[in-house]
Amino acid sequence: MTEPAIRRRGLMLVLSSPSGAGKTTISRMLLARDTGITMSVSVTTRPPRPGEVDGRDYQFISVEQFHGLAAGDELLEHARVFDNYYGTPRRPVEEVLAQGRDVLFDIDWQGTQQLAQNARADLVSVFILPPSVEELERRLRARNQDSEEVVRKRMDKAADEMSHWREYDYIVVNRDVEESVASVLAILAAERLRRDRQAGLPELVQRLRGD
Ligand code: 5GP
């Protein structure tokens, strides 16, 4: 008889990048290809962009609501990015991890640092870099949703964000989106196999040894 799947501890997979590096596309493809991952839906005080859906892309909330959540310790991490606040609701993440499933986070370096301080053992962090400055700018402009001033501000912010690349476990240079998704899936596959994440191993080995 084949042994049942080994019980394991869920992990927290963080993807960070400057905006325009292709992170959103990579996240969507990961979620479509791996049913073991659940996306963490952040709260934000920024207004929705065209096409964004409340509860799917973000929970769009007021500044007062945000401060209430932060004060009540209901956020796993939170940060101010550009002129808005962002945060990760704690409870949904804890519920998914408890089921032995993985959670995908699209958060910035500040949030990643907080997770590294509070939950290092569960964290796997990946930084996505654009292949060149020209490509980064092209992708930021192709969005065509933000004003020229916002694009320039984001180019500056991208430089800031990228200065934190050394704080991440893995770096993926997004030359080709299919290749990048394959890289992140490989990271995920290896990290799931880490001995300390396979919580059911001691029992399996005990049975294998006939004890
Ligand atoms: P955007 O407004 O373009 O959706 O996101 C701007 C930045 O905020 C991105 O770098 C994104 O990763 C980051 N971000 C989104 N949600 C969160 C969050 O819950 N926490 C933190 N720390 N950063 C977030």
Image: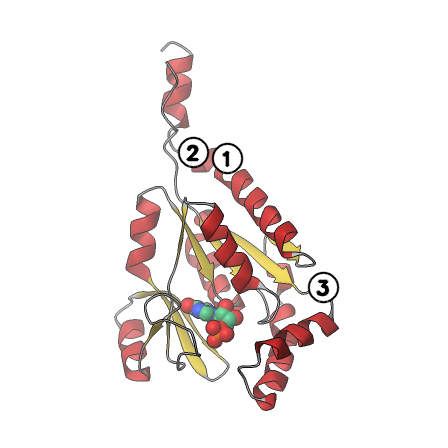
Q: Nearer the viewer, residue 68 or 101?
A: 101
Judge depth for marks 1 and 3 and give the one in front. Answer: 3
| Pointer 3 residue | 131
Q: Nearer the viewer, residue 28 or 195?
A: 28
Sequence-first disc among 1 and 3: 3
Q: Nearer the viewer, residue 179 or 8?
A: 179
Q: Secondary structure at mark 2?
A: loop
Q: Residue at x 60, y 83 (%)?
A: 151
- Whole-angstrom CA distance, mark 1 to mark 3, is 30 Å
Q: Which numbered dot is residue 198?
A: 2
Q: Which numbered dot is residue 193?
A: 1
> In the picture shown, does residue 203 fall above or below 127?
above
Q: Quadrant of residue 59?
A: bottom left
Res 134 seen here: yes
Q: Residue at x 51, y 36 (%)?
A: 194
Q: Secondary structure at mark 1?
A: loop
Identify the amino acid type marked 3: Pro
State left or right for residue 101 relative to residue 73: right
Ligand 1 within 8 A of label 2's CB? no
Classify mark 3: residues with Cα within 10 Å, few (<14), some (14-19) or many (20+): some
User: Cβ–Cβ below 8 Å for labels 2 and 1?
Assistant: yes
Give the x, y percent position of residue 130: 67, 65
Task: Give the residue furthest to the top.
Answer: 210
Q: Quadrant of residue 54?
A: bottom left
Sequence-first disc among 3 and 2: 3
Judge depth for marks 3 and 2 and give the one in front. Answer: 3
Q: Residue at x 31, y 43 (%)?
A: 99
Q: Nearer the viewer, residue 177 or 120?
A: 177
User: Cβ–Cβ below 8 Å for labels 1 and 3?
Assistant: no
- Whole-angstrom CA distance, mark 2 to mark 1, is 7 Å
Q: Quadrant of residue 71?
A: bottom left
